[in-house]
Image (spheres, rainbow, N blue to C red):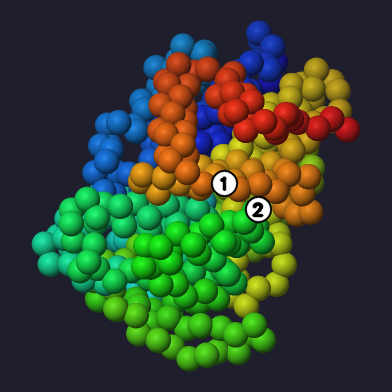
Amino acid sequence: MAHIVILGAGLGGAVMAYEMKAELRAEDRLTVITKDPKYHFVPSNPWVAVKWRERIDTEIDLAPAMRRRGIDFRPIAAKQVVAAENRVELVDGSSVDYDYLIIATGPELAFDEVEGLGPEGGFTQSICHIDHAEKAYVAFEEFCKNPGPIVVGAVQGASCFGPAYEFLFILETELRRRKIRDKVPMTFVTSEPYIGHLGLDGVGDTKGLLESNMREKHIKWMTSSRIAKAEPGVLHVEQIGDDGTSKGITEVPAKFSMMLPAFRGIKPLFGNEGLVNPRGFVIVDQHQQNPTFKNVFSVGVCVAIPPMGKTPVPVGVPKTGFMIESMVTATALNIGQIIRGEAPTHQGSWNAVCLADFGDSGIAFVAQPQIPPRNVNWSSEGKWVHLAKIGFEKYFIGKMKSGNSEPFYEKLALQVLGIDKLKEVKND
């Protein structure tokens, strides 16, 4: 008998639980440990922040689905992973022993790395968590009573740029609907070396498509930028030249701002030499397996991936939903092999599909693989993207409620896009 423990139950962890359960033998046990008993569909947060969705629309009580699948569900936060002793210590004083651990915690949000950043004691909003999105809506409603400049973007070291672009255009759409767009100058401030870089050196013509949409909607932008600090009503933005030298600091007015932070690993992972890199991201090989602790695997945003190359301002590599599901499938298959006495052979394909909603249209892109050079490098725009994002939201929330591990929507999406085997898991 083997006891598999999954730490985290967000996008990666919840899907991991369902796929892992399908690979286990009758005598094996599966436990999920998470600090939050409710799952929140993070891609809907930009909509929550303008009240196009309510919290209840995107929130799922995971316990019933886990119980139906025979999964032990422990909604208690982890205090410390003790990898050398195969144990996870919890904040209530208890601990859980494991034979195999899958780390799927997602990141810690590093607001503290920029003075004045973030919704907790800072002066900028966030859409990284449902609580942040709800606070952003309250701030936005207050803003609309006496509108002024808006700044949206991502700070130095950020690795998740798609939601920043989404929220920028969703805000623009909402301002037009409220008939106050003419009173709101909008600026996009990003650490990317160019618009549409996305931490991926662009996908298809994301640069042209996004720049064109910004020009059409009268949105200014600042690239290769780092936020020196945020203060009430203003962001201090330092632009960096291609040679790495500073072009000086500009005070950018911001009566309402949303800046995505950099990510780092969670504190309970530190203190295990060989488990995480200096930022706290979990080190894995091609099989999602940690080289030091062979019974530890990891999936999702908490996995360590080196940046694509040197940029004037540090830019991380995003871990998109399709990429995460590829990691999940490979991990489930590999652990299934190991507990049956076989060597792991499966590798995630790490392809990317993104639907970036703009409120009434959007941009989609496909990168196969996610990191160039690519076999598929495609992007497109249109109202169909907005509708596709709504469809994906409904499908995925239904999938989480039912405990279904079958990637039906993913297969359907690939057929619509005309791309075969996007989520294919490679075998050694």
Residue located at (41% from left, 45% from top)? 361
Is 171 on the left-hand or right-hand side of 111? left
Residue 145 versus residue 238: which sits nearer the camera? 145
In the picture, the quarter occupied by the N terminus is: top right
| Mark with earlier residue (2, 1) | 2
Name the spot of residue 210 as percent of width and height, x first: 50, 59
Instruction: Give the answer, above or below, for where 327 lies relative to 242.
Output: above
Q: Quadrant of the C terminus?
A: top right
Around disc 1, counting alpha carbons within 10 Å, would you say few (fewer than 14), some (14 to 19), or many (20 or more)?
some
Residue 275 location, x and y as percent? 69, 51
* C-beta proximity under 8 Å, tags 2 and 1: yes
Look at label 1 and name its amino acid. Ser
Question: On the image, numbered disc 2 is attached to which residue?
Answer: 204
Disc 2 marks a residue whose amino acid type is Gly
Going by the picture, which residue comes out furthest to the top?
26
**Would you place residue 273 above or below residue 391 in this image?**
below
Q: Nearer the viewer, residue 382 or 377?
A: 382
**346 or 406, nearer to the observer:** 406
Q: Which of the 4 image quadrants contains residue 250?
A: bottom left
The secondary element bearing badge 1 is classed as strand
Position above or below: 277 against 384: below
Q: Nearer the viewer, residue 45 or 305?
A: 45
- Numbered badge on residue 380: 1
Q: CA distance from mark 2 to mark 1?
A: 8 Å
Q: Name the residue at 64% across, 29% down.
A: 414
Q: Residues within 10 Å of mark 2 (few under 14, many from 20)?
A: some
Residue sitting at 49 percent across and 18 percent down?
403
For the point 69% across and 54% down, the residue is 305
- Res 71 seen here: yes
